[in-house]
Amino acid sequence: MAEDIASETFLAAAQTWGLEGPPPNPTAWLYHVAKNKARTTLQREQVFRTNVTPAIKGLAPGNSDPEIDLSPQSIDDSQLQMMFAICHPSIPPEAQIGLALRILCGFGILEIADAFLSNKETINKRLFRAREKLREENIRIELPSPAEITSRLGTVLTTIYLLFNEGYYSESGNAILRKDFCLEAIRLCYMLTGNASTDQPQVNALLALMCFHASRFEARVNNKGDIILYEDQDTTLWNTELISRGGYYLSRAAHGDTLSTYHLEAMIAYWSTQKTDSPEKWENILQLYNQLLQLEYSPIAALNRTYALARANGKQAGIAEAIKLKLIDNHFYFALLGELYTNIDNGKASENFQRAMELARTPADRAMMEKKMLSITSCLKRTSSP
Amino acid sequence: MDEFMLIFRHEDGNKVASPEQLQAWMKQTMDWIGGIAAQNKFVGSNGLLFDGSKVVRHNSVVTNGPFGEIKETIGGYITVKAESIEEAVAFAKGCPILVGEGNSVEVRKIAKRDGVH
């Protein structure tokens, strides 16, 4: 089918470019047309399978007329079913994200390769293997049974969250594409809230979490594409509409008796939208991280928890806790130690920023650590000179 | 890596704390457990309530309690991962219940179901 779409796209190009001349951006034109064609084809297939075929089979006398349902509701339902088929535990998360980007969001192979800092061949292979696997396992394109839906929903949410993170934290330089990934993740999650069986508290919590994060999209990168740290962000660029949306979904998430990691992360993200520092803010963030880590450990949560602890309980307490983490191959660990030692023991602060710089993987991170180190070193010189 | 259970023993389960004391104690406990979890050494925990507790004895004799009859009551436990008993003991030393003089934390290695222990 992919080949058919590619040939059809080139045919369309040959027909229209010949008459009107090539468009200003031929690559984008081709992607756009191919994306639309793919989308239409998939929707057509889906509608055919779920509506047309049963309708034709039911043409026997006495049955109602075989009208094709092209309503937004029907298209959403098809996409939901496809989402569950793609986000299947039998294929690895990376392949799930790839398939979701390709099939549900209509991104091109090149765009996906760009986001994963990979190449076309690798992505093609990955998607091919994933499709084969889904075929072998005979995965049906349908919503899981009510008994299964909560556990299967977990995998779907993980994939959506990974897709969002791919956009939010990706090392790829393509800022527009990254934002598109985030918006697609939000769209897919929003779609889950539109169906009674998938509109569950943890789904709303994830949606809230993504809204809160996305609210800082414009503020966290400058026009050169460099990351701007939270403390230095221009808060007038924060999207208040998204923040209040996040609040709305967080209140919708406050049902049931399960506290998911998404709930905790969404509440932490909520506090991050409150720029004003207060003891209450950091105490709340600390307790949320304490709970989050008990549910699910991750190095980044451990580091953030320690930072919050230093803000709530003081730097000395923070240093004592940080030393115990021993995440010695993580540059954020040394950046945290550098931060905590700043103005307590500037010699140690400088050493730690140095380690962080050596371990940093991206030029942007290295530059940031170097800047921190230099500011400490100049501080040291000033205090030691007569 | 082995698993150890840290059992909180309270000298007097009947002591009534003020809401402020309770809140402070809660925070210290959460920070202590969070610190263990931040090292990826936390396995699980449970607080045990004193309200309405019973003791079942020989011949199905059921009494309220265990207060008054024995010196110590168990207030809860936490299970951790540790490289050695020393590391588990180091975790226990941070437990906020030890602020109370008569309280203690018992550290016990959990038997592996490997047919040897």
Image (cartoon, coloured by chain):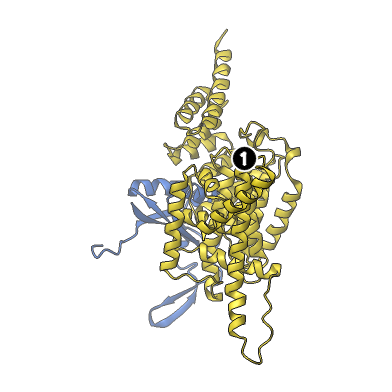
Chain colours: A yellow, B blue
Which residue bears the numbered disc 1? A175
> Can you name the residue that lies furthest to the bottom here?
A62
Q: Decide if residue A185 is on the left or right side of residue A361.
A: right
Figure quadrant of residue A237? top right
Q: Decide if residue A216 is on the left or right side of residue A90.
A: right
Q: What amino acid does circle 1 point to?
A: Ala
Q: Looking at the image, is B40 positioned above or below residue A72?
A: above
Residue B8 picture location, percent across and down: 45, 57
Image point (56%, 43%), residue name? A169
Nearer to the camera, B50 or A50: A50
Residue A191 picture location, percent across and down: 65, 63
Residue B5 picture location, percent across and down: 39, 57
Residue A69 picture location, percent across and down: 68, 74
Nearer to the camera, A340 or B72: A340
Q: Looking at the image, is A133 positioned above or below residue B29?
A: below
Figure quadrant of residue A137? bottom left
Nearer to the camera, A381 or A332: A332
Helix, strand or loop at disc 1? Answer: helix
Q: Residues within 10 Å of mark 1 (few under 14, many from 20)?
A: some
Figure quadrant of residue A277? top right
